[in-house]
Image (cartoon, rainbow, N blue to C red):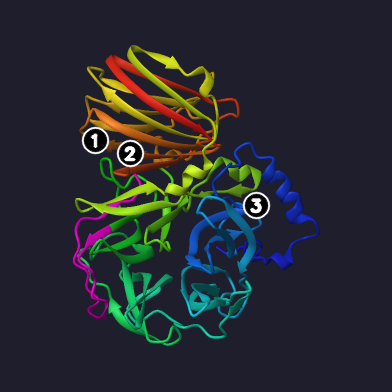
């Protein structure tokens, strides 16, 4: 449906429009303390994540005028440590012939003293038909970004719809490769593979052959890399039917792990599709390498086509913490990057053994902290942590020994979120001893389970005075060994 207001440029803003919107946004009680968030409007996919010129560069999709998906800019952030981020303003501004209706998602490649930014230009014709163009811009050492005049790929190949976007580019030997999210004309999702010798002229290799020929109606935000002699393909399939304890969000995000891909043959031998995050709000992740060789991931802490309580304040969404990826026992592990320790301030410790009761940690009240808790269930049927608690609000993270699941429950977390995705997520876990590492911010939590075995991410919208923490056990005894660092 056409909405001209959605596709305004910043130059079309009314006098003081953005300044007035910023006042509303920054008065929101759910502004984050240490996560990347927009100054106004909507943030979504992380883009162009790379280490270049002594800093990490990260862009994100940004619609400035409100919490809706409209004209998208690339907004530019930089960091020396993956934790403290500097605002560099608009990176890529749309509105040209090949990105007239938005600079959509893409990636970055650092080479020859420049940062090459590959992205999808969104356009609409007079009949409102979509025409995607794959575009290139270049960031130089002085911080200037220049768009290339012509797209490097000007249309989808035959057999695929206009849902063709999100290039992820990498270099192998002396050649460059790119994967794109795509949709076949039969309305099924896939990844397409291209090759170049100079970053300018690209040849279509073919559709990447996988064992998932009918797996959702569109695959977004692909990312291919190799780690520990394995090939890893990240992507976001849309349209998967929900299953017990799987695929419960409106759209999914996950990975395939297999043999290193031979890109010239466009074939990937892999295992089962696994979700990257078992929580509520995670999508469109992107990775890069650090100078010391780590593979780092950042995701969008939100979902498309969903309403959030901050919408009423003129903004929506944030990005996750940076996570280090490793492989263990044919599984991709995610841990917070070690640099998050730079956020730590005051430290508190507690050890409790609880039987059929609840203990409130009186001096631990906060809305911005890291909490590490080793939880052991002796004979308790249920035990866990209640956090962001108040008179009538709480978020629960607990283990149910009867069903052998770890549960994240935001039923009573405060302001209600969309009903269609439910309010509880369950992660199957057959172990009565576990390490839970929580990163709580003003309106979110990221839970890392057993040193990265699984992650559960959620946006939370409690009252400002709901800052308590409690430990509880039901049906028996459990012990808690916990450390909290205020941020």
Q: Is residue 252 visible?
A: no
**What residue did someone put label 2 on?**
449
Instruction: Residue at the far right: name it.
Output: 15
Q: Main secondary structure of the magenta part?
A: loop
Sequence-earlier tag: 1 or 3? 3
Percent across and percent down for residue 170 are 38, 73
Start and end of the magenta stretch? 256-279
Q: Residues within 10 Å of mark 3 (few under 14, many from 20)?
A: many
Up/down of 277 relative to 80, above or below = above
The residue lying at 54 percent from left, 72 percent from top is 128
Percent across and percent down for residue 217 are 33, 62
Sequence-earlier tag: 3 or 2? 3
**What residue did someone put label 3 on?**
39
Q: Are marks 2 and 1 in contact (CB under 8 Å)?
A: yes
Q: Is residue 121 visible?
A: yes
* Label 3 – label 2 distance at C-alpha: 31 Å
* Label 1 – label 3 distance at C-alpha: 39 Å
């Amino acid at each position: 449906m056409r909405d001209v207001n959605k596709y305004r440029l910043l130059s079309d803003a009314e006098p003081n429009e953005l300044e007035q919107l910023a006042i509303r946004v920054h008065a929101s009680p759910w502004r984050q303390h240490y996560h990347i968030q927009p100054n106004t409007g909507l943030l979504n996919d992380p883009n162009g994540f790379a280490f270049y010129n002594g800093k990490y560069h990260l862009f994100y999709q940004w619609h400035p005028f409100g919490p809706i998906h409209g004209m998208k800019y690339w907004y530019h952030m930089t960091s020396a440590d993956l934790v403290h981020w500097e605002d560099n303003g608009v990176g890529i501004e749309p509105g040209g012939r090949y990105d007239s209706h938005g600079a959509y998602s893409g990636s970055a490649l650092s080479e020859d003293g420049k940062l090459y930014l590959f992205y999808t230009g969104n356009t609409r014709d007079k009949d409102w038909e979509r025409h995607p163009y794959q575009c290139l811009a270049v960031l130089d050492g002085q911080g200037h970004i220049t768009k290339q005049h012509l797209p490097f790929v000007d249309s989808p190949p035959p057999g695929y719809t206009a849902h063709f976007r999100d290039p992820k580019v990498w270099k192998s030997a002396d050649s460059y490769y790119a994967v794109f999210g795509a949709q076949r004309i039969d309305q099924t999702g896939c990844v397409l593979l291209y090759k170049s010798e100079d970053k300018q002229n690209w040849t279509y290799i073919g559709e990447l052959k996988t064992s998932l020929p009918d797996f959702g109606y569109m695959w977004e935000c692909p990312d291919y890399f190799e780690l520990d002699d394995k090939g890893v393909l990240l992507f976001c399939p849309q349209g998967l039917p929900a299953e017990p304890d799987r695929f419960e969000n409106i759209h999914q995000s996950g990975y395939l792990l297999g043999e290193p891909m031979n890109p010239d043959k466009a074939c990937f031998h892999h295992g089962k599709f696994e979700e990257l995050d078992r929580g509520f709000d995670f999508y469109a992740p992107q990775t890069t390498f650090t100078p010391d060789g780590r593979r780092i991931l950042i995701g969008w802490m939100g979902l498309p086509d969903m309403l959030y309580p901050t919408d009423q304040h003129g903004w929506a969404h944030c990005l996750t913490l940076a996570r280090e990826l490793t492989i263990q026992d044919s599984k991709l592990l995610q841990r917070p990057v070690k640099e998050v320790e730079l956020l730590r301030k005051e430290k508190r410790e507690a050890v409790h053994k609880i039987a059929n009761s609840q203990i409130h940690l009186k001096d631990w009240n906060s809305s911005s902290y890291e909490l590490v808790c080793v939880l052991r269930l002796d004979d308790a049927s249920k035990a866990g942590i209640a956090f962001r608690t108040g008179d009538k609000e709480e978020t629960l993270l607990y283990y149910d020994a009867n069903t052998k699941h770890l549960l994240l429950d935001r039923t009573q977390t405060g302001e209600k979120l969309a009903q269609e995705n439910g309010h509880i997520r369950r992660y199957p876990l057959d172990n009565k001893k576990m390490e839970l590492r929580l990163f709580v911010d003003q309106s979110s939590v990221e839970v890392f389970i057993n040193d990265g075995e699984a992650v559960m991410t959620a946006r939370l919208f409690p009252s400002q005075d709901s800052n308590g923490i409690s430990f509880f056990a039901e049906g028996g005894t459990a012990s808690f060994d916990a450390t909290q660092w205020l941020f």
